[in-house]
Image (cartoon, rainbow, N blue to C red):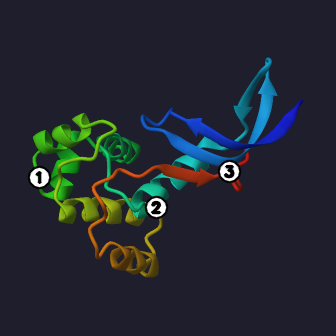
Amino acid sequence: METKTQKSFVDTGFGFPVHLVNVPMVKVRGIWTPSIDYNKLTRAVLRVIAYKAGRLTGAEVRFARQHFGLTLQQFGKRLGVSHVAVMKWEKSSRQVTAMNWATEKDIRLFILLKLTPSSSQMLSLYSALEEVPSQKAGKIEVTGEGLAA
């Protein structure tokens, strides 16, 4: 079985591009594919979404909602908005949503709480979210180390 490390790889399977850096690859039936544990990658992507410098896109909101198994109604109730508002955000796809910063901050904190309910990490993220980021979406980048299958 042939293997290599690829400096850069873009995975679009999450509904938005995830830029992987230093990815272990394996050749399967003549095609190079990432040799990673996608459960670990999913958790890494969620963590990056929670901490990313740019605003959230509709695709990222949808990914987080679906990952945690919430319906539009459940997610909206959790955030204090209607399911129609959630649908509107998600329809923005790869563009930033029109949600207010307080709601976006709540989504980021919800993600981190579900991943690791550590009070020190929650406090760290809350402090990091004091300032509203730029209106740019920013890219999702994950390092391949630690994701090997």
* Quadrant showing the C terminus: top right
Q: Residue at x 23, y 47 (%)?
A: 97
Q: Residue at x 40, y 62 (%)?
A: 53
Nearest the camera: 138 or 14?
138
Give the labeled residue for mark 3: 144
Q: Earlier in the sequence, mark 3 or mark 2?
A: 2
- Vertical order, 103 against 9 (above or below): below
Q: Position of residue 117 (x, y in %)?
A: 43, 70
> Would residue 74 appear left or right of 14 to someone viewing this image?
left
Q: Position of residue 130 (x, y in %)?
A: 29, 76
How many other residues sit within 10 Å of disc 2, few (<14), some (14-19) or many (≥20)? some
Q: Earlier in the sequence, mark 1 or mark 2?
A: 1
How many other residues sit within 10 Å of disc 1, few (<14), some (14-19) or many (≥20)? some
Q: Amino acid at mark 1?
A: Val
Query: Label for residue 115?
Result: 2
SS type, badge 1: loop
Give the labeled residue for mark 1: 81
Q: Position of residue 135 (x, y in %)?
A: 27, 55
Picture quadrant of residue 109 = bottom left
Contact? badges 3 and 2 (CB < 8 Å):
no
How many other residues sit within 10 Å of disc 3, few (<14), some (14-19) or many (≥20)? many
- Vertical order, 135 against 119 (above or below): above
Q: Amino acid at mark 2?
A: Leu
Q: Earlier in the sequence, mark 3 or mark 1?
A: 1
Q: Amino acid at mark 3?
A: Gly
SS type, badge 2: helix
* Quadrant showing the N terminus: top right
Q: Residue at x 79, y 33 (%)?
A: 26
Q: Residue at x 19, y 65 (%)?
A: 102
